[in-house]
Amino acid sequence: MKVTQQAPDSTSTVRRSGRTVPTVVGGYAELLVVSLAAFGLAGLGWGLWRPTMSGTIAEGGGVEITDPSVMNGNREFTTFGVMVFCFLVLGIALALWTARRGRQFMSPLLLVWGVVCSALGSALFFLSGTKLALWRVGVPNPDELHVGSELTYLPDVGLSVAGLVAPFVFLISAWCLAIFGPDEAPAQNGVGAPEV
C-alpha cells in the first residue's frame, strides 16, 4: 500500500463563515501574530528586568549618583546590550519558526514581510518594555523635586539602531534556511515517506 501526502498549494483557499481566505494570507497573518506576541512578551520581560538608578538632585539640575554599585558601571550600556541580544535571539527564533512553519510560502515576499514583522515587533518590544518599566518605577512629581531630594529613575535608552537588529538577523537567517535548509519536512508516522 502506497501512502503519499501532497503539500498544500499556496493558492488553495479555506472557507470560513461564508468568506474565502487564501492560505498564503493566513500564513502571513500567522507570522505577524506570532512575531508581535513573541516580541511583546519578551519586551515585558525586559521591562521587568530593567535596572534603575538612584541619586540625589544636585545644584544646577543634575543628579548625583549615590549608589556605589553604579559608580563604575554603565547601566545604560547594559540595558541597551540586553535589548540588542533579545532582538538577536528573537530574529533567529522567528526565522526558524518561519522556515519550519511557512516552508510552503517561502519566497522573497515572505522575507520582506518577515522583515516588516520583525521591525514592528522590535518597536512593540521597546514600547511595551519601556512602559512597563516606567509604570514599575514611577515618574516623580515635578513639584516635589528640589535640591537634595532622593530620586530613582530609569537609565535613558533609546531604540536607535537596535531596532534594525531583528529584521537584519531574520532576513539573513531565513535566507540561509531557505537556501541551505532541507527541501521537505521529515516523514511522520509513515505519511509523506518516499515510495519504495
Image (spheres, rainbow, N blue to C red):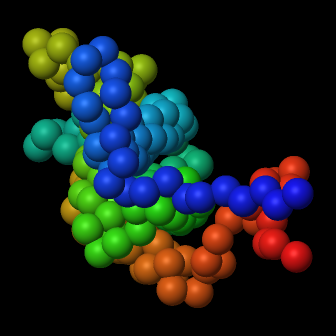
Question: Which residue is at a point 55% across and 77% down the rendered structure image?
Answer: 177
Apparent side of residue 195 relative to residue 43 in the rendered image (left or right): right
Instruction: Give 168 or 161, whichever is nearer the viewer.
Output: 168
Instruction: Give 129 or 97, whichever is nearer the viewer.
Output: 97
Instruction: Give 48 or 181, whichever is nearer the viewer.
Output: 181
Question: Which residue is at a point 13% across and 40% down the rendered structure image?
Answer: 61
Considering only vertical position in the picture, is 46 above or below 120?
above
Apparent side of residue 154 relative to residue 88 in the rendered image (left or right): left
- Residue 55 x, y percent position in the rendering: 38, 36
- Residue 44 x, y percent position in the rendering: 46, 32
**Res 89 → quadrant:** bottom right
- Residue 175 x, y percent position in the rendering: 44, 80
**Res 83 → quadrant:** bottom left
- Residue 52 x, y percent position in the rendering: 45, 37
Instruction: Give 134 or 142, whichever is nearer the viewer.
Output: 134
Question: Which residue is at a point 55% across and 47% down the rendered structure image?
Answer: 68
